Amino acid sequence: MAKDTYPGIKLEGHWFGPDYLSEFHGARQKKQGPADYGVRSGISLDQEIALCYQNAKYLYQTYLNGNAEGAAAITEFVRKFLKETLSHKVEPFPVEDPELFSPEHGELLLSCGHVPVRIVSCDFSRDASTRRIWSSAFSDLQIYLNKKPEYLWGITTNGYFLRILRDNDRISRHAYIEADLSLLLSEDGYS
């Protein structure tokens, strides 16, 4: 059901089902009003979402029109996306485990003071491991979240896909929400 309604969003695992996602779309969950998101007076939540969506599309097009393959371009896009579209404070993340977070896998940021953001090059597979590190570029953040109780959520992206991960002790069964940025931000189906 979510696949038909939200073709650019993939739900993996059992955090919540498609019906729950539909409730958010209709703003039927608690804490879904304009005041809960700090929307300015005189602007509806729908208008604010439309403005944020247009900003995200602009940032994505700028990213694609530049050098979309380079690590610096991906990092710049993600920083601006988190800051300008989602109003997140973004800062460098203090790397505690250089073997787990190898520079060859990209940059690590901290969003909102408590959400690690893993930015990897688009030439890294989301799920396949590399020769040097036994886990994939997206899985290493999952492993880190499981080790560190102070971090419940994490975000990882390669510039084309964005995954939201949660601390999950069941490594054998992944659980995440994945957004296909090229599908969501290259068309007007969500404006």
Image (cartoon, rainbow, N blue to C red):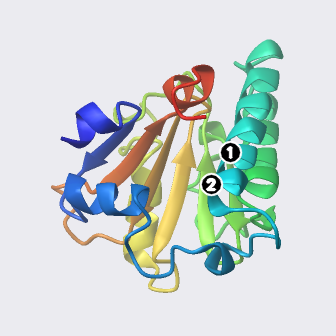
Q: From where the camera sits, is residue 72 visible?
A: yes
Which quarter shows the N terminus? top left
Q: Position of residue 183 (x, y in %)?
A: 50, 24
Q: Position of residue 99 (x, y in %)?
A: 55, 55
Which quarter shows the C terminus? top right
Left/right placement of residue 186 relative to residue 149 reads right
Left/right placement of residue 48 relative to residue 182 reads right
Disc 1/disc 2 C-alpha distance (Å): 6 Å
State the residue at coordinates (70%, 66%): 110
Residue at the bottom extreme, as displayed: 150
- Numbered marks: total: 2
**Residue contact between numbered discs 1 and 2, judged by CB atoms under 8 Å:** yes
Please rate how many residues cluster around mark 1, counting C-alpha atoms within 10 Å: few if below 14, some from 14 to 19, many from 20. some
Q: Position of residue 88 (x, y in %)?
A: 74, 65
List the residue tagged with mark 2: 46
Q: Is residue 51 above or below residue 31?
A: above
- What's under tag 1, amino acid-wise? Ala
State the residue at coordinates (24%, 72%): 169
Question: Which secondary structure, mark 1?
Answer: helix
Q: Is residue 76 above or below residue 168?
A: above
- Choose between 139 and 40: the one closer to the eye: 40
Quarter of the image holding residue 78? top right
- Choose between 46 and 167: the one closer to the eye: 46
- Choose between 17 and 38: the one closer to the eye: 38
Please rate how many residues cluster around mark 2, counting C-alpha atoms within 10 Å: few if below 14, some from 14 to 19, many from 20. few
Residue at the front extreme, as displayed: 42
Q: From where the camera sits, is residue 100 visible?
A: no
Q: Position of residue 137 (x, y in %)?
A: 47, 42
- What's under tag 2, amino acid-wise? Asp
List the residue tagged with mark 1: 50
Q: Is residue 126 above or below residue 123?
A: below
